[in-house]
Image: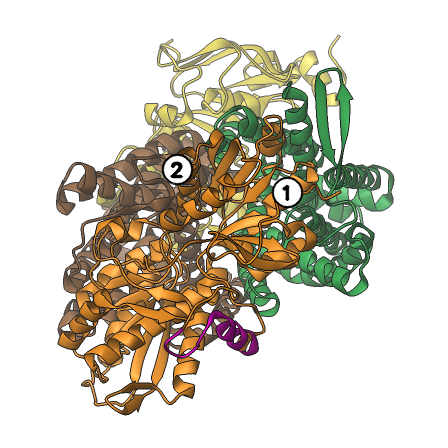
Amino acid sequence: MSRKYLLLILSFGALLAVPSVIHDTFFLRIITEAILWIGLAISWDVLAGYTGYLNFGHGAFFGIGAYTTALLMKLCGWSFFLALPFAGLAAGALAVIAGIPTLRLKGAYFAIATWALSRAIQQVALVMDITGGPDGMRLPTFLHPDFFYYLMLGVVAAIFALYWFLLEKAPFGLKVKAIREDDQSAMSLGLNPTWIKLQAFILSAVPTGILGAIYAYWITYIDPASVLGDLVTDQAVVMAVFGGLGTLIGPAIGAIIIYLFKTYFWAYLSDYQVLYLIILGGVIAASVVFLPNGLWGTISGYLQTRNAVKQKPVPQEKIDKGVHHV
Amino acid sequence: MSEPLLQVNAVTKTFGGLHAVFQVSFHITPGEIIGLIGPNGAGKTTLFNVISGFYAPNKGQILFNGQDISGKPPYKLAVLGIGRTFQVVKPFAGLTVLENVIIASFARHPKRRQAEQHAWMILETTGLADRANAQASSLTLAGRKRLEVSKALALEPTLLLLDEVVAGLNPTEADRTIELILSLRDQGITILIVEHIMRVIMNISDRVVVLNFGQKIAEGVPRDVAKDSGVIQAYLGEAPQ
Amino acid sequence: MELLPQATVDGLLIGGIYITIAIGFSLAYGVMHIIDFAVGEWIMLGAFLGYYLNLWSVLDPFILLPAIFLVFAVIGYLIQPLVYRVISGKKGNPVLMGLVFTFGLALMFRGAALTGFGFYSHSIPSAISQDSFFIEMGSVFITIPYVRLAGLLYAIAITLVLHFVLKKTDFGRAVRALSQHREASGLMGINAKRISSYVYGIYVGLSAMTGVIIGSIFTLNAQMGGEYTILAFFIVVLAGMGYLAGVPWAAFLLGLVQSFFLIYLNPSYTLMAVFGILFTILLISPKGLFGRGV
Amino acid sequence: MKGRTKVLALLLVLAMSVPVWADEARDFFKVGVITSLSGSLATGGNVTKRGYDLWADAVNAAGGIEIQGKKYPVKLFYGDDQSEPAQGASAAERLATQEKVDFVLGPYASGLTLAAAPVLEKFKIPMITGSAESPMIWKEKFRYTFGTIPPVNYTGSAPINTIAGLNPKPKTALILGSNDTFSKATAEAFQDAAVKAGIKVLKFNIVPSGQDLIPYLSAAKAMQPDLIAFGGHDEELIKLVKALNQINYTPKALLMHYGVTEPAFIEALQKSADQVFGASVWTESIKTKGEVLWPDAKSYADAAMKAYNVPADYTQAGSSAAGIAFQMALIKINGVPPLDEKKRDELVDALEKLKVNTFYGEIGFATEGQFYHANVGLTPLTIQIQNGKVVVVGPDSLAESKPLYPMKAKK
């Protein structure tokens, strides 16, 4: 466990140093976007991997965050940092409104209901005047690569840490998993599944809205197709599944690999423009067939079985401690 | 006699016009072990589900410690002190045995550390401590049934509903479980148990309630009930006249 | 002039097209519990085969339908074991695995079509695709395009044939057994794998035929798939997933909603209304209009 | 493991710190191309790509751009924006920092231009887009962004005026647009022009993209509009014509925008494409005199046909013309590669003052007002499909043929 921590802290430290090593703003942009996708993949996985609910409308939270920021900055003249929390709040509010009815649905029905909802929201943005309809919105331009890099890194690291604490350390994580495994049994043990699922939904939505806000300010232009389309959800799903559901590290690894793979093809093999679709599609399909637990799931599964051989019996002092407590 | 801990008053539960449970009444006093028996499809599990809050009764009332709990959701009842097991065991398969029990412990010990200590203690009593770090899915059937009881116990219930925790076990395992049940009663936990194996029910129950076609057809000490003609007929498959 | 009859007829005609989009998909879901993200891409591929066959043979697309069905049924039959392997895995979440797997397939097909067929939109000309007839009764005047009527008739025919096959043949009984009692059907000596392969073949073949009809009524291009995947999802969920008999009603309902919105209300809000209705129905009756979904 | 971690961290840092080499002297121009090679706008994106490629090939076939007696070839560097604004911005950043391009030929669609422009503005790299007709770009007044195709609110009125002048004059119109930036702006431009021309607009609607419009049209048929004008993209245009045929309604005139000049439109509809009006600023038959590369529209069209075996449309021509605009401005300022920041600034000034006759028509960028930096040197044309060919039918001074009017029913 401590090894894992060490690795995480080391990579975070390395990431902090990136702008002082890399002066190429394109690379910085690529890394910034890779970090954005890590955030989106893990926030999707909070619901999918930990509670088993496949949200195919994840992009709606992202878009709501982006539009909230754009509207507050343009119409109310707010500063970005003032608008930022409201982007999270708006996404959280949507999670509550959408979550209470939809979380009753099971399996594919939940997936399709959330997807339909996100489509409906996209249509709303397309027909409203205040959002510019299909023309989208332009935000004040503030193009400072280091600023966005550190902002994205800071926010995603905070999200990661928050998730890590809540899902892997705090009681909440076990409760959520209990509901994923068997909600009837969980109910009989005093857990209110609706409430816990709703909490997980909010936990997934708020950071996504904040990431949407950063995206909007960073790219300076948003429209219904780019922030409310299927792309955000589709890509986050693929990354999380490829990396391995139900963990935080899996989707993060998935995000990095898929994003860099796609970007490499895009940047350097552009003449084979459609080939990348074929290859990306092939990688996704093959990974599902050959790595049903995702990349990280497979690796850690392998490590576990290897370690299981050497596993020590339960330490006696732990048992004693428990008994002593009686 | 002290106040009844649980009072079931003329409870009816119907599914699409069919009475799964019809006007059943009985009570349990603290410290008792009550056996709930009846042929297949008699409505035992449905009654369990009604008492533990998974179904709301269509008619009738359930009082727990004098408080009306009919229609309250299971997670509220769990906190009030009603623990239950499932006939078809429901471990959290992807989690470890310890984690399974910790989750139940949260009801009384919201802090992770305390919950974990509590869980260790429970596993010690139920004899699963040596399997604490194994995946729940790797347990044998006996282990899973034990885990089921451990989880219910971790709630520190005053009333424990056990749904066929002995059925399917070999004689040694069964004896260990019976011992466990009796020791729980000695700790002051009141128990309502559904069991198919007559030997078990008749040996450990203070009283038994017999259901057939959703209705209560007999109630009393095991010895008397075993002689009841209606009960015998029900078990022999003939409808009572 | 009275618009109501025309709006109704138009809605039903659109509904006819929607039936063809969704019926195979619903069948596949009922039997295999797979949500196929590539349904639109099967439609697209079928449309292109129809387009090229029509260019080459100059036969009317409606005459080409059986050939297209055959070709794609074989493709579906051959691909199915892979799909089966994905969705019957013990590990992970099979629904999700199926979704992601077919999502990957869809990307591949789209990329391959863009490479092979280019970006342009085409149309498959049919002898009947440019004309219509009228019904006049007093003040009521209804225009009915031949090609759309043909589409509706085709949809009804397919529905009836499927219905007949499922109810009256041994194969159909096996399919129904499989969709209702997966475990028990194995005990009854039904080869689930074999039946699933046939069903998947039928589904792919039906989708491909739909592509040809869409190509002759509307247009076809390499990126058309997404739009029809959405429609297929929509109708199947509305009908109740895997509940075949619900598909025509859901399709007609959707067609009518669209038609009435376009005619009587603000056309801008048509799609919003459509998604709003899907969402609402799922909330009121999570298993579709009839509560009969799997 | 600790050692391994260190090695990994080191590798990570190494991998990321690709050397930033200095701008070496070179004797060719690096030209960035940002356009949609994939995604939903790939059709149009590839049309612009062909236009840019054709220009580059023509320049290089002549040995390069001649500046002070020396010829400098051009080399294109592509950035696929994948029809996504974020990727458009990334593409701009990559071309600016990785390839260090001297100038950029821009995206196909407005949203992408809006995302790429601020990045290029930051690096002070001039961009001319050969497409992107939505009026919204020019409102932003980017100093480094230009466009060769006039915005649709500049061109959209021409065909309406032509049609309004026909006999018998159309009295009523049904105007609709698909709900995307370009199509909506087109429909709005049609509406404004129709009102000004005294045509009564019976119905004006923005409809969701890709909708089946049969119910809408069969209801509209009851009103018997003389003119139906539609803003949409190629696929939607084909669908609309087919839908009108299916309900057997022939208005006096059917008007769409540039999409009708795309080969796919005629290929898909064949005879049904006949007599459809469209708006354009260029066809292969218009009379233009080019000072550089291609002497007239015809020779450009022939070159395009030879290169790609697809007839050139005005987007492709506008894209090639974007290259020419850069070329001429470079000659004016004696800009030799690589261009530094100061030189690129001069290039912008030269572009603002540029007036050049090309095969595409006169290029001259507005320097103020709502068309800021858009090309307003061109005369908007009314075109019509006649016997499967795109023919200019208006304005009268440039018309090659009389408009066929009113439209004849197909039967």
Give SS at disc 2.
helix
Q: Tell me if residue D136 is in the magenta stretch.
A: no
Q: Position of residue B230 (x, y in %)?
A: 69, 12
Per the image, the residue denoted by label 2 is D192
Looking at the rendering, which quadrant does residue C259 occupy?
top right
Residue under label 1: D407
Mark drawn on residue A297: none
Left or right, residue C40 beside residue D324: right
Q: Residue at x 81, y 43 (%)?
A: C172
Viewer-closest of C112 and D188:
D188
Mark 1 is surrounded, within 10 Å at the Cα level, by few (under 14), some (14 to 19) or many (20 or more) other residues, namely some
Question: Could you tell me if residue C194 is visible in this image?
Answer: yes
Q: Report whether residue A105 is seen.
A: no
- Which residues, given as a range, are shown in magenta? D290-306
Query: Which subunit holds the residue at mark 2?
Result: D
Residue at figure coordinates x 55%, y 19% from the top left: B208
Residue C187 on image: x %, y %: 76, 47
**Residue visible at 69% across and 57% down in the picture:** C46
- The amino acid pointed to by label 2 is Asp
* Chain B, hue in figure: yellow
Name of the residue lying farthest toward the right: C169
Q: Quick one: quadrant of the N terminus of chain B?
A: top left
Look at the picture and state if D375 lies above or below D274: below
Q: Amino acid at mark 1?
A: Met
Query: What distance separates the C-alpha of mark 1 from that of mark 2?
Result: 23 Å
Note the chain letter of the brown one: A
Tags 1 and 2 touching, CB below 8 Å:
no
Q: Earlier in the sequence, mark 1 or mark 2?
A: 2
Name the tint of chain C in the rendering: green
